[in-house]
Image (cartoon, rainbow, N blue to C red):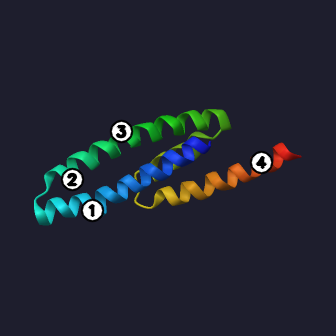
Amino acid sequence: MRLFRLVSLIEGLSLLTLLLVAIPLRAYLGLHEAVYYVGWTHGVLFLVYGALALVVSHRRGWSIAYWLMVFLLGAVPFGFLVVDAQLKRALRSSEVLEGA
């Protein structure tokens, strides 16, 4: 779960970098390489995010609707913050249960 949370944060930041840095660099300065490299990095991270979301959902017993929501939030700018808050809450509750 901690690995998924880390990948979620990195993937979300890569999406923001693509949207807020690389695309404007291409549009205003003609630097097409920025979108190429950041886009590839984001694409690979999104695939890892999707695969880990599937693994975590299976281990945690998430419903298909919940998994789909988590997966789609990975494609929404700042959606990773919502996922991170939910994962933090789930980690805290599992630590409390393990400590009892």
The residue nearer to you, when weighing 36 against 52, is: 36
Q: Amino acid at mark 4?
A: Glu
Residue 22 pos. (x, y %): 24, 58
User: Marks 2 and 1: CB-CB under 8 Å?
Assistant: yes
**Alpha-carbon neighbours of circle 1 within 10 Å: few (<14), some, or many (≥20)?**
some
Q: Earlier in the sequence, mark 1 or mark 4?
A: 1
In this picture, is 22 found above or below 61?
below
For disc 2, the marked residue is 34
Residue at 17 percent across and 49 percent down: it is 33
Answer whether residue 65 is visible to the viewer in this image.
no
User: Can see residue 35?
Assistant: yes
Residue picked out by circle 1? 21
Q: Which mark is residue 52?
A: none
Q: Amino acid at mark 2?
A: Ala
Q: Earlier in the sequence, mark 1 or mark 3?
A: 1
Residue lying furthest right in this view? 100
Residue type at mark 1 is Val
Position of residue 70 measured from the top left corner of the image (x, y, whole percent): 52, 48
Q: Alpha-carbon distance for marks 2 and 3?
A: 16 Å
Residue tagged 3: 44
Looking at the rendered structure, which numbered label has been put on residue 95? 4
Q: Is residue 87 above or below residue 98?
A: below
Secondary structure under tag 4 reads helix
The quarter of the rendered structure image containing the N terminus is top right
Residue ranking furthest to the left: 30
Residue located 37% across and 53% down the image: 14
First along the sequence among labels 4 and 2 = 2
